[in-house]
Amino acid sequence: MVKRLSNNQTLREVIEELLSAYRIEDKVNEAKVIGLWDKVVGKMIARETTHLNIKNKILYVKLNSPALKQELGFAREKLVKMLNKEAGSEVISDIAFV
């Protein structure tokens, strides 16, 4: 159980302490990155995305279009930076298009 230092904590601080105590910060951040995918890549690419999954800091993205898979491969580093920036921390280190 988390021992509170004072009663003057914000709700955000309390939630962050709970996430840390239960060691689920990483899973919450991963869900945040997956939720941000559509915003970062746009509607056209999001429509061609069928599945997103994160394992060992690698975002696996399943796409319908082989041509889009190749094009996004060239923008991989930029997408990693944009997703991490939007999430507010380094959640992923790479993206694999499958």
Image (cartoon, rainbow, N blue to C red):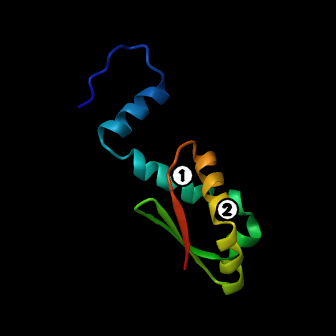
89 or 78: nearer the viewer: 78
Tell whether label 1 touches label 2 (CB within 8 Å).
Answer: no
Q: Is residue 38 left or right of residue 16?
A: right
The numbered disc on residue 15 is: none
Q: Where the C terminus falls, by quadrant?
A: bottom right
Q: Amino acid at mark 1?
A: Lys
Q: Is residue 83 left or right of residue 21?
A: right
The residue at the point 71 percent across, 63 percent down is: 41
Q: Secondary structure at mark 1?
A: helix
Q: Residue furthest bottom?
A: 66
Q: Where the N terminus falls, by quadrant?
A: top left
Q: Secondary structure at mark 2?
A: helix
The residue at the point 69 percent across, 66 percent down is: 75
Q: Residue furthest left?
A: 1
Residue 20: x and y, percent?
35, 38
* Label 1 crowd bin: few (<14), some (14–19), many (20+), radius 10 Å: some
91 w.r.t. 94: above or below: above
Q: Quadrant of residue 61?
A: bottom right
| Residue that mark 2 sits on | 38
Mark 2 or mark 1: name the one nearer the start of the chain.
Answer: 1
The numbered disc on residue 32 is: 1
Estimate the spatial distance between the alpha carbons at disc 2 and disc 1, rounded to whole Å.
Answer: 11 Å
32 w.r.t. 70: above or below: above
The residue at the point 66 percent across, 86 percent down is: 66
The residue at the point 35 percent across, 13 percent down is: 6
- In this rendering, the count of numbered labels is 2
71 or 11: nearer the viewer: 71
* Label 2 crowd bin: few (<14), some (14–19), many (20+), radius 10 Å: some
Residue 72: x and y, percent?
68, 72
Residue 86: x and y, percent?
63, 47
Residue 3: x and y, percent?
26, 23
Q: Amino acid at mark 2?
A: Asp
